[in-house]
Amino acid sequence: MLFFSVQEVYGRKVEKKWFWFLGIYLIILAGFRHDVGPDYGSYYGIYIYSDTKSYFSIFMKMLHMEGPDTLDVEWLYTLLNKVLLNVFNAPFYMVTLIVAIFAICFKVEYTDDNTFYPFTFTLFMFIPNFFVGESGQIRQNLGTFIVYFAIRYIKERKFWHYMFFIFLGSGIHSVCYLFLPMYWLARVPLNKITMLILIIGSIFLSPFEIYRVFGDFLSGMAEESTLVEGFNGYMDETVQRLNGGFGIPEAMMAILTFFLFVFDTKMKELYPYYEYHRNYAVVGICFYFIFRNNPIFSSRLAGAFIGFSYIIIPNTMYVVPSRVKNMVYAFIIALVVFNFVVFASFNNIKAGRFSIDLYKNYILP
């Protein structure tokens, strides 16, 4: 990734086929893993659980109606698991493989659609996203990649195409419903004053936990009782952090906000569809601070928007002079190294079984 990243930043555009080769390798790593990732056991439990639900109940869940069986997991993901187990009696790695194939394919396409630096963006987001996403929270990861991909239909103003992918994404994870208003919000004009008011307002609202007004609606999107324990394998929330301390998430919000305000004018002038990326970023930052006192909400609900918003950071290299471009790229590489050090220092590599001695793959040595 680093080799092609340097080439696309300082040389010529790298052919898309090389990006697909990277995607295939990531599919193998995530799809054929065996007992790797903090949520692996939880998803295996869902695999067995899905076979206890009737097809009629799954169909009724798709229509948002009650069937004879209660489904605690979204209908499309339940259907995928049930068909693989009930019809094909497939081993569990077929679930992780199919999910990885779709997730990576959507990821390759949306990345190629939205940045001139796909390898740089992938490198920038690789840690911890690949381990928490493709190899961790695979449902939300796939669902959000589906709706990220669907941004192309916002650009093309194809409402029903966009709705179709929201429908598919929400069948994998209900957090995708939050992206429905983005068909309209992505085009709302924002200036720096408006962004500042929205972000500062969200910071002031943070202690009041106004998200509690929505009750079970948001809880259903973010919480999965069978997965919280595994998810917490990647969480290291200290008492200070939960009581208003400044930590890495706040630092990343500050960095994203800095890029929004410093490069906004140039990006609007020179980068295609930057306004869409900016609006996703503003929504993500506001969500983060509004949900800040709830680590699950602030990571899953806000993170769904913020994960896409970081694309703004490498994209700024397209609109700035070479000296500033060098500084931005050096900053990105420094963040990659920093993320690796932090991820490793929290023992997440061992906890997720990603170390050389613990990682197992069905087809890799």
Image: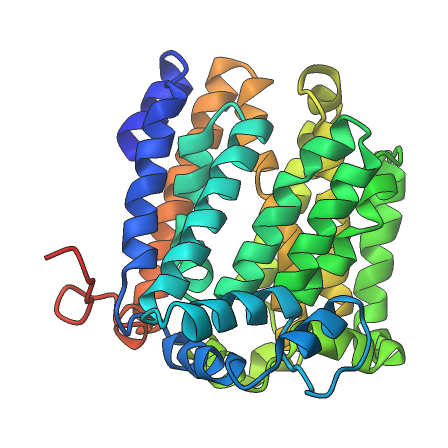
* 325 over 283 or under it: above or below: above
* 281 over 10 or under it: above or below: below
Q: Residue furthest left?
A: 365
Q: Residue at the location (48% across, 31% down)?
A: 328
- For residue 148, which quarter of the picture? top right
* 279 over 320 or under it: above or below: below
Give the color scheme: rainbow, by chain, secondary structure or one colour. rainbow
In x, y percent, where is residue 268?
75, 22
Q: Is residue 159 left or right of residue 127?
A: right
In x, y percent, where is residue 74?
65, 71
In x, y percent, where is residue 329?
43, 30
* 190 over 48 or under it: above or below: above
Quadrant placement of the C terminus: bottom left
In x, y percent, where is residue 86?
45, 75
- For residue 258, which quarter of the picture? top right
Q: Residue at the location (28% across, 54% down)?
A: 29
